Image (tube, helix red, strand yellow):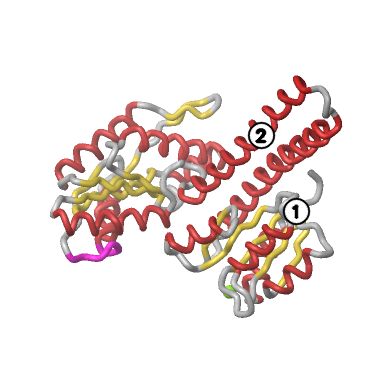
Amino acid sequence: MEKINLLIVDDEEEYIDLMSEILEKEGYTIFTAHSGPEALEFLKTTEVDIILLDILMPTMLGYSVCEKIRKNYNTRPIQIILVSGLVDDMYLEKALEVGGDDFIHKPIVPLELQRRTKAAVIRLRSQLKLFTERESLKETVAKKDDQHQHLKKEFETIKKINIELSTSNKNLKIKVRYDMLSGLLNRMSLFNTIDIEIERAIRSGAPLTGIMLDIDHFKRVNDNFGHQVGDIVIQRIGEMLNNSLRKYDYAGRYGGEEFFMLLTNATLQQGYIIGERFRYSLEEHPINCTNKSIRVTISMGIAQYRLGESRDAWIGRADKALYKAKKMGRNRIVLE
Ligand SMILES: [Mg+2]
């Protein structure tokens, strides 16, 4: 695919400028619109591949714009990424319901914007391929009315392609909930899950423990081996965290190289054992990155939830303990 036409729709000039500036460097052809109606008008004359669509706009909400685009242009793939400062799961669900492909939060994080847009290009390419195959098969089927045997086979293929399309849509939903690199919950889903588990702990009285993890000297990994290796390290740690969890625990990517383990029905001491086991296994198993293996260690701060405290206060205590672990020389777990 040659040039990607990208339309940014936002009622606020500063967001348009910011996103344009970030994405222009990536080589997209950028168009802008300041409202839903203006965007819909624009689409009548210009073929657009990716749309970054603000949800909160005074004349028409991004949701309705999204629905209209899906209705009017259902014969070709357009990737629509909804953009908003609304963080609740409800808004996310709604964004998917109206046909959005992905979701980006405000304030805009440049790296996230670049990555999610790039992911949209990848989806666009694979959908274009599927669309073309489906269209050409439809034509073939129409021509060969009499060759029943043949037809049957081709119908089967169409069926298969349709299933593939719907699976790829399901995968999109997963991508919105999970961090693309580590495969763990993304920050927003992590917070939602923590809130749910806090509620549950308050009702049941069961202990709830959280561990804040940070990769030691991660900057050195990036500086010495490059960002791609840094990405592999995050990926592998994501996988290892996922594998080491009990089935009712959660792990999420809190920030760049920071992770949070949410251990339900676990006391501080039980959490400590789980954390220590993970720390040890990482210390014992260097991470394989293409042609070299890298030894990576982590520091951890652990805190048990106290009835009545806020999510942020709790995470704050774990974070403080993590800070202590760093100060004490890293590669260790510190109880709050
Ligand atoms: Mg707005």
Locate residue 172 relative to residue 87 in the image: left or right: right
Q: Residue at x 63, y 63 (%)?
A: 66
* Ligand 1 lies in quarter: bottom right
Q: Residue at x 60, y 36 (%)?
A: 163
Q: Residue 179: x and y, percent?
A: 47, 47
Image mark for residue 27: 1
Q: Residues within 10 Å of mark 1 (few under 14, many from 20)?
A: few
Locate residue 171 relative to residue 138 in the image: left or right: left
Please state which of the two labelled residues, at mark 1 or mark 2, is closer to the viewer.
Answer: 2
- Name above or below for residue 4 compared with residue 56: above
Locate residue 330 relative to residue 93 in the image: left or right: left
Q: Residue 276: x and y, percent?
A: 24, 37
Mark 2 residue type: Ile
Give 137 or 204, whichever is nearer the viewer.
137
Q: Residue at x 44, y 44 (%)?
A: 218
Image mark for residue 161: 2
Q: Farthest residue toward the top?
A: 149
Give 116 or 255, whichever is nearer the viewer.
116
Q: Residue at x 30, y 63 (%)?
A: 312
Task: Indicate the secondary structure of the residue bearing disc 2.
Answer: helix
Task: Indicate the secondary structure of the residue bearing disc 1.
Answer: loop
Mark 1 residue type: Gly
- Name above or below for residue 250 compared with residue 244: below
Q: Residue 55: x and y, percent?
A: 57, 69
Give 153 or 307, whichever is nearer the viewer.
153
Q: Residue 280: x and y, percent?
A: 28, 32
- Magenta span: 308-313
